[in-house]
Amino acid sequence: MTFLPNPCVPRDLPGCTLLALPPEIDVCNAGELLSLIMAAADARADQLRVLVLDLTATRFMDSQGVRLINDVRHRLRSRARVRVVAAPDGVPSHVLEVTGVRRDVPVYGSLAEALRA
């Protein structure tokens, strides 16, 4: 079962915007998630420096999740840095490791680490 975004309600924190992503990211919802993430970034264009994508509640992610993160990174290239939070032993963390995304996007094991960085 694919969970649709709820929608990713942005939380503005000191120095960054945080978006918690849904329990599943796959072909059924990745396009909608990209639209929601970019709308949140566009709404904060003047002050957005860091965008944190929180995958701690995400239990399933396939190649569409990887593509989503890469698309966000490329679209925000000059406006903001992207950071990802993923539980170290979770599926998203393993998928990001295997696909090599971790070389290009910092992945943190906890939200606290991502916010401190």
Image: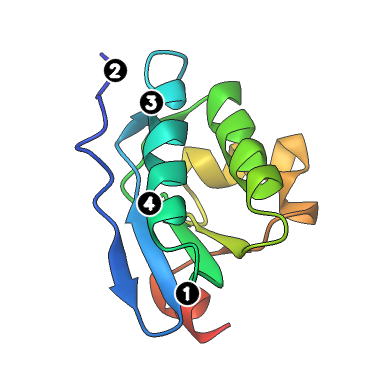
**Residue under numbered circle 2:** 2
Chain-order first, disc 4 or disc 3: 3
**Residue under numbered circle 4:** 40
Nearer to us of marks 2 and 1 is 1
Q: Are marks 4 and 3 in contact (CB under 8 Å)?
A: no
Secondary structure, mark 2, is: loop
Three-letter amino acid code at disc 3? Glu
Graded by Cα atoms within 10 Å as few (under 14), some (14 to 19) or many (20 or more), the crowding at tag 2 reads few
Three-letter amino acid code at disc 2? Thr
Quarter in which the C terminus is drawn: bottom right
Q: CA distance from mark 2 to mark 1?
A: 33 Å
Quarter in which the N terminus is drawn: top left
Which residue is at a point 77% across and 54% down the rendered structure image?
104
Graded by Cα atoms within 10 Å as few (under 14), some (14 to 19) or many (20 or more), the crowding at tag 4 reads many
Measuring from the top left, give residue 17's x and y in whole percent. Answer: 40, 67
Measuring from the top left, give residue 113's x and y in whole percent. Answer: 50, 78
Query: Dividing the picture into quarters, in which one does residue 58 lie?
Result: top left
Measuring from the top left, give residue 72's x and y in whole percent. Answer: 59, 43
In the drawing, does residue 29 fall left or right of residue 10? right
Q: Where 55 falls versus 15 (above or below)? A: above
Secondary structure, mark 1, is: loop
Q: CA distance from mark 2 to mark 3?
A: 12 Å
**Residue under numbered circle 1:** 47
Three-letter amino acid code at disc 4? Ala
Which residue is at a point 37% across and 51% down the rendered structure image?
40
Query: Dividing the picture into quarters, in which one does residue 2 lie?
Result: top left
Please tell me which residue lies in front, 77 or 1.
Answer: 77
Tag on residue 32?
3
Please tell me which residue lies in front, 79 or 104.
Answer: 79
